[in-house]
Amino acid sequence: MSETTAAGQRADMVRNRRLLLGAATAAFAERGVEVSMGEIAQRAGLAKGTVFRHFASKEDLLAAIMLQLLDRLTGTADRLRQADDAAAALREFMTNGVEALAADRAFCEVVGRPSLQNPDVRAAINHLCDAAEALTARAREQGAVRDDVTGTDIVLLLGGIHQTAAPLLADQPQAWRRYLELALDGLHVPNAGALPEQPPRGLPLDGSPATG
């Protein structure tokens, strides 16, 4: 096989994977996880066998879509880690995070929990928490947030803000911004008393208690 032919095949694989992920994201958001792999292939304009060459099962496809979102959020956190203004960096990260959840709310509601069974998704969530902690630590050092806020708190708040605004988003697509501002104000409370309960030591992704 020539280098030109191999390069063309790789380009086709990348293109097909992108088409499949886009079609699957839309289909799952519209109709839930019962959508067949055949329908996803049809939406993508590809043969059904192409789906299975990229994803051995529907569960693998669900996980791949969730990994896209998690990787995007982690990339944002990593990009902002060295920003001079830690408060502005944390604000940008949280804004991007809640905006992404709001934009993909139907998919996240349908697919989010099933995909947590995938070890790669679980690892990516832990990586996101680590990246958020790096941002939050700098914000703590600069006095931009209260001393007892952690990166895992921030990741949990992203979902919490989204869920708070979710009933309003059909009529007010930007309603999440109101609750984001309330959360950001609460993160920076000068001379605040200690928060009740210990900070989370991780996310209990399988329903079991988090361990340190």
Image (tube, grey):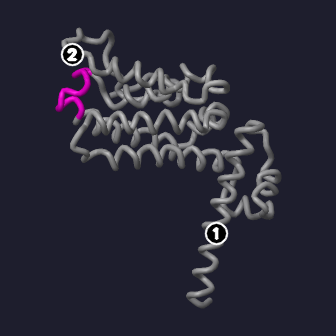
Q: Residue at x 19, y 27 (%)?
A: 143
> Circle 1 — which element?
helix
Task: Quickly name the residue at label 2.
Answer: 190
Q: Residue at x 34, y 17 (%)?
A: 186
Residue type, mark 2 in image: Pro
Residue 70 among magenta residues: no
The quadrant the N terminus occupies is bottom right
Query: For mark 2, does the 10 Å Cα neighbourhood hold few (<14), some (14 to 19), or many (20 or more) residues?
Result: few
Residue 143 among magenta residues: yes
- In this view of the protein, which residue sits in the foreground, 142 or 155? 142
The quadrant the C terminus occupies is top left
> Circle 2 — which element?
loop
Give the image location of residue 102, x and y in percent.
Answer: 57, 33
The image quadrant of residue 101 is top right
Give the image location of residue 159, x and y in percent.
Answer: 50, 27
Q: Is residue 61 above or below residue 186?
A: below
- In this view of the protein, which residue sits in the foreground, 195 or 119? 195
Label 2 and label 1: CA atoms lie apart by 53 Å
User: Which label number is shown at residue 13?
Assistant: 1
Circle 2/circle 1 CB separation < 8 Å: no
Query: For mark 1, does the 10 Å Cα neighbourhood hold few (<14), some (14 to 19), or many (20 or more) residues?
Result: some
Magenta residues, start to end = 139-148
Give the image location of residue 211, x and y in percent.
Answer: 37, 26
